[in-house]
Image (cartoon, helix red, strand yellow):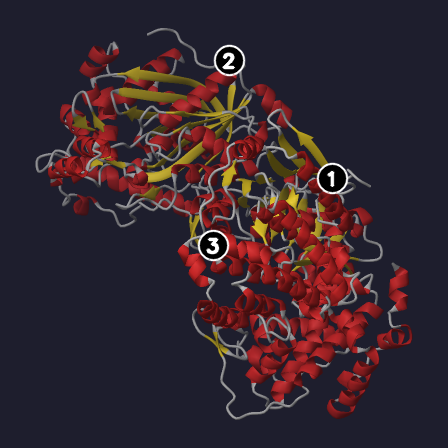
Amino acid sequence: MSNKHWKLDTDNNNVAWLTLDQADTGTNVLSSEVMQELHNRLNELEAQKPLALIIKSAKKSGFIAGADISMFETFDTPEQAYEMVRNGQGIMDQIENLPFPTVAQINGFALGGGLELALACDYRVMTDSSKAVLGFPEVKLGLCPGFGGTVRATQLIGVTAAMDMMLTGRNIRPKAAKRMGLVTQIVPARHLDKAAEMIALKPPIKKARSLKFKAMDSLPSRKVLAKVLRKQVAKKAKKSHYPAPYRMIDLWEEFGGDPQTMYKEEARAISELMVTDTSRSLVRVFGLQNKLKAGGKSKHKFEHVHVIGAGVMGGDIAAWCAYRGMTVSLQDREYKYIAPALERAQKLFVKKTRSAQKASYVMDRIIPDVNGDCVGQADVVIEAIYENPEAKRALYASLEPKMKAGAVLATNTSSIKLEDISHELSDPNRLIGLHFFNPVALMPLVEVIGTDTTNKLDLEKGMAFTRKIDRLPLACKSSPGFVVNRVLTPYMNEAFFIANEGVPLIEIDKAATDFGMPMGPIELADTVGLDVAGHVGKILADAYGIEMPDGLEEMLEKKHLGKKTGQGFYTYDKKGKPHKPKAENYTAPADLAERMVYQYLNEAVAVLRDGVVTDPESLDAGMIFGTGFAPFRGGPIHYIRSTGANNIVAKLKEFENKYGARFKPDAGWDAFITTGENSNNTESE
Amino acid sequence: MSKRNAYNDRPVYVIDGARTPFLKARGKPGLFSASELAVNAGRTLLARQPFSPEDLDEVVIGCAMPSPDEPNIGRLIALRLGCGDETPGYTVMRNCASAMQAVDNAAKDIALGRADLMLAGGTEAMSRAPVLFNDDMVNFLGDLARARKPMDKLKVFSKFRPGHLKPVIGIMKGLTDPLVDLNMGQTCEVIAHKFDITRREMDEYSVRSHLRLANAVDEGYMDEIVPLFHKGKVLGEDDGMRRDSNADKLGTIKPFFDRKVGKVTAANSSQITDGSALLLLASEDAVKKYNLKPLGRLVDTEWAGLNAAEMGLGPVYATTPLLQRNNLSLADIDYWELNEAFAGQVLACQAAWEDDEFCQKELGLDKALGSIDPEKINIDGGAVSLGHPVGATGARLSLHALNVLKRKDQKLAIATLCIGGGLGGAMLLERV
């Protein structure tokens, strides 16, 4: 097992080069094996006493992606985790205490434990590639750094910058990293070896910590700053939902003046966080994300996308594809319908590239195409016209002869079954659904829709294309509402029912956000558009008998469509900010959240029973990335398991008696209760 | 005149073309850079072809005043159009004929057998022509950079004068002949005087240019235009057009170049505009390979030199030998696109061909060459009404001439223009 992952060479100058090339993977992570072998190598180096040590990665993808997440799940108690963490800290200390200069050579990402290893070195040289990033993503898994990062980062770049990195988990690009003092030097990738060698042979004198940093470490300023930080964090996350950022602030406030104690307390903090439900759920979500990504692994050539319909969805899909490097032709009846989409695209690109010039280069890739001249060049044709089966069928009839062999024909329909629009195609099994969500640039999920007879290859291409444009594909069976809209609708309907009962809107939304939803259902409906919500609601009412609340029709008649018309449930100002009337001296009923969320869960169980998705994990992933279902709860099915299906069904029955038949538990629950799992569906995979 | 023959070895076809609307410069940098203009026209033009941009052998772009951040704009445009690393590109500068020169260069490469498929044309963002520091200011900044000690710096500062801040307007320099020290408008005054063109004639010609353009727009004849987009709006028309133009009103405008006493005004001159026009040229082989449907054939091209003070007569000097070489008379040409640099200059060219003495003395003819039927020249307006983005105009003239031939079901056209510095260029085009 020794020398499996780390390669140690010593050059003519007596500089040691320690290269991590973790076996059997494309990405280095700090697994227990990798850590143990590192420890052995450091022992050798202590004896060998080279002039200097350079630590680098042999992987093209980057330096080290962090700790081995799969390890976390093996710990049942904080004590087990604590031992592992302290052990790792010891190895970092060993690097720091080597009696010769050490240089970390960062050729791409250095994240979490990878960054902490780099911080334990005396110097860091980094590629200036725009893809390279440094960061502490631990908070996104409900954790804090554990290999001394909270101490070393604060020491090196000051508490403000370090806390910002650790609390947000955001990535730092090379130029910013240099400016912050996080790295010693940035150079083009071709000079990394040379730069590391120069530093190793002639180590620059390290600057003493600035007075400002030192002053910030004093107890009084820690107290003040901790208060400010807590306030900032509170705007983003509730302590009961996401304890990790609060724990990091506490850690620094209490022990920021005493590094040795802080290391121990850091280990204690991460160990305790690691066994919380939040962290377990977030680690699970991370795994679900990778599962979705793996769905689009097959390799196909996608260079040109043709989008028909330059409305909100079509236009934004076109813009996103162009941003992700595709050549895009955007078709609509007249140029005037394309112009607004181009304006939105321009704004998106300026925001994303932070440069009008670069944005203009991305714009070069969008070809306004009123005549449909580009259909024949497209690898993927996406139809995003209005929801009318006849119009879609007529369009496909004109498209199919023009399309090149092997090109994918996809519809972005949110409510029409593929079978209803594909049957006139010469190959009815070629049509797939690529259902994007609004706003396309922010919503990572795409439902990839097929029927039982849809060509496997076309579906596979749809999944791969979705990955190619950096979205997460969720394979769904063609059925009304697919997954996301179907599960969301009863939940939003319930919010309307509650509103009809006279509960103030703001209280309804608050109940949902308190549960952990990113946005309340009332505001969500306004944002989606009440016409869209109403349209989907009606289709689901017809298909599944999902009961629609009163009052929506009248709002639609009055053109109160939500945010886009300035008036929905809420009134919106010119900037699109809702005016939410306060509810003074009002105590909301205690069951609001349960009423809405249990509708959501009930429909999720129904979706699983219908086999719209292949397995419960996919469903959880879809609902988290498609609707933002509280990630710290790990997804609806995970939530059902942790709460207990029996409890939820009992509550549904209680609600059925109290509020009506719409709460009748779905037949799918039976399988859940008896086996703890929806066995029918897991088998079908 | 020598018996040069342009492209006879291998025929050169014009497959298709497109241009942006020409947008009038309004005293501020325009909405689009020169490369953006060309990319907007080019990507739509290329999108409707049965080959990919990467199949082009080369991209040749005329541009008379590229901005400092668009070096070798021809290559930049090729890359932005997705022609790939392996398609070379370069930039051509021949003042007002830059695009015509680019097309000629591309055509020559096809005729020589060095290329089969070329994108050629021009682009210009005149509104973005550079504004420069004058020499005094540049010297001042140089001295300041060299001064190290505070006292030295102070000494340099003490020499600063407000006159240092007087900018050099790039576009004024570009439109002035450095040798004869006349700006382009003044050269028109010279030839208008020579052929006794009146102010009223110029203004009436200008009104006609606007009305002809308006008619062409209304009839849908301007489908060569690919629109531009800005802030959710479609910019689909040449925006310098005045539907309400009339000669009496134009008569009240003051002369711009020869102040007070001259005849040439801003209104009877071409408009300073931003725009781009591009043509796709192909060899016979490429036509067959991709099954292309040519718009026409580029038969022959002629370039001529003349007294820079009379540069506006350039079309006369270039066209005459072109006709002679191809055994054609003025009347054989079905339609003309003679660039309207100035209304007076278009009229002077026609007057020159009608003048026995001029034709004998300057063109070596026995007598006057003849007249051009006013219904055959610039029938959809010209640079006076739709603008003259100098580097792009040459390609627009050829493209529109071919489109007119197609519409009228006629055979031969000439696209010709005068060029600052005392040059003329002319292209003979044939519908196939």
Residue B393 location in percent, x, y? 36, 32
Residue that numbered label 1 is attached to: A405
Would you say residue A385 is visible in this rendering?
yes
Q: What residue type is labelled 1?
A: Ala
Residue A107 location in percent, x, y? 60, 39
What whole-number distance in Å separates the C-alpha atoms at marks 3 and 2?
46 Å
Residue sitting nearer the eye, A260 or A173: A260
What whole-number distance in Å separates the C-alpha atoms at marks 3 and 1?
35 Å
A627 in relation to A556, above or below: above
What whole-number distance in Å separates the C-alpha atoms at marks 2 and 1?
37 Å
Would you say residue A415 is visible in this rendering?
no
Q: Is mark 2 on a helix, strand or loop?
A: helix
Residue that numbered label 3 is attached to: A347
Q: Which residue is at 25% across, 12% downward?
A: B363
In this rendering, position of residue A36 left or right of residue A315: right
Quick one: quadrant of the N terminus of chain A?
A: top right
Chain of the residue under the numbered disc 1 shown in the image: A
Chain of the residue under the numbered disc 3 shown in the image: A
In this rendering, position of residue A672 left or right of residue A5: right
Q: Do labels 2 and 1 share a chain?
A: no
Q: What element carries label 1?
A: loop
Residue A241 location in percent, x, y? 64, 73
Q: What residue type is labelled 2?
A: Leu
Residue sitting nearer the eye, A618 or A463: A618
